[in-house]
Image (spheres, grey):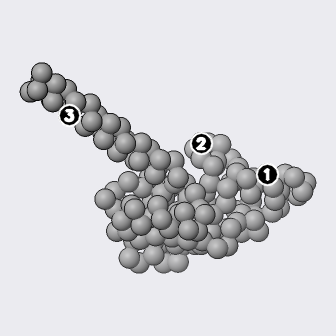
């Protein structure tokens, strides 16, 4: 299974010149903890950074900066890791672990944003797989009881 099959395709984005107050409003409106920062060369959404609710608290609120003047570009994480949508899920999990990231923008071959993969998404998929395996064990036990009383 590829990350393109399991990622969330409804990504909330913001441009780097927007004030952090707008980022906070978007996070609240869409109930998300992070926004992907994009540039739009030729109308394509190219991810260039990420800003999280923690960034807003630690970088703006805790330092009492003016949230109407500070921009998303001022506080966004500059080092952004992305994965292509055809990356295998297992490889994505390994990548997230090695890079210690909880969120990964997913891009197409041209580098345009197509989705986001989060730790929550991965945990949900893994828990569903584990539940399926547990059901298989129960089924096998019932089957053996039926055929070998």
Q: Which residue is mark 3?
A: 140
Question: In which image quadrant can residue 66 be found?
Answer: bottom right
Q: Which residue is mark 2?
A: 31
In the drawing, does residue 48 fall left or right of residue 145? right
* Residue nearer the viewer, 8 or 93: 93
Q: Position of residue 52 (x, y in %)?
A: 67, 56
* Residue nearer the viewer, 86 or 132: 132
133 above or below 145?
below
Residue at point 22% right, 30% down? 141
Residue 57: which numbered mark, if any?
1
View extreme (right): residue: 64
Describe the element under mark 3 as helix, strand or loop.
helix
Say whether marks 3 and 2 touch (CB < 8 Å). no
In the drawing, does residue 17 fall left or right of residue 96? right
Residue at point 55% right, 59% down? 103
Is the C terminus in the top left, top right, bottom left or bottom right quadrant?
Answer: top left
10 Å neighbourhood of mark 1: few (<14), some, or many (≥20)? Answer: few
Describe the element under mark 2 as helix, strand or loop.
loop
Q: Position of residue 123 (x, y in %)?
A: 47, 47
Q: Position of residue 10 (x, y in %)?
A: 46, 52
Q: Position of residue 48 (x, y in %)?
A: 59, 72
Residue at point 37% right, 42% down? 130
């Amino acid at each position: 299974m590829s990350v393109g099959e399991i990622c969330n395709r409804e990504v909330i984005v913001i441009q780097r010149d927007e004030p952090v107050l707008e980022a906070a409003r978007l996070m609240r409106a869409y109930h998300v903890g992070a926004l992907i920062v994009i540039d739009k060369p030729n109308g394509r959404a190219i991810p260039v950074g990420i800003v999280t609710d923690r960034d807003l608290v630690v970088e703006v609120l805790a330092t009492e900066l003016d949230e109407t003047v500070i921009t998303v570009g001022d506080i966004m994480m500059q080092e952004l890791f992305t994965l292509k949508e055809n990356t295998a899920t297992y490889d994505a999990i390994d990548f997230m672990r090695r890079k210690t990231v909880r969120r990964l923008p997913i891009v197409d071959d041209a580098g345009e944003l197509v989705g986001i993969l989060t730790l929550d998404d991965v945990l949900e998929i893994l828990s569903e797989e584990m539940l399926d395996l547990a059901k298989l064990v129960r089924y096998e036990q019932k089957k053996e009881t039926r055929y070998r009383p």
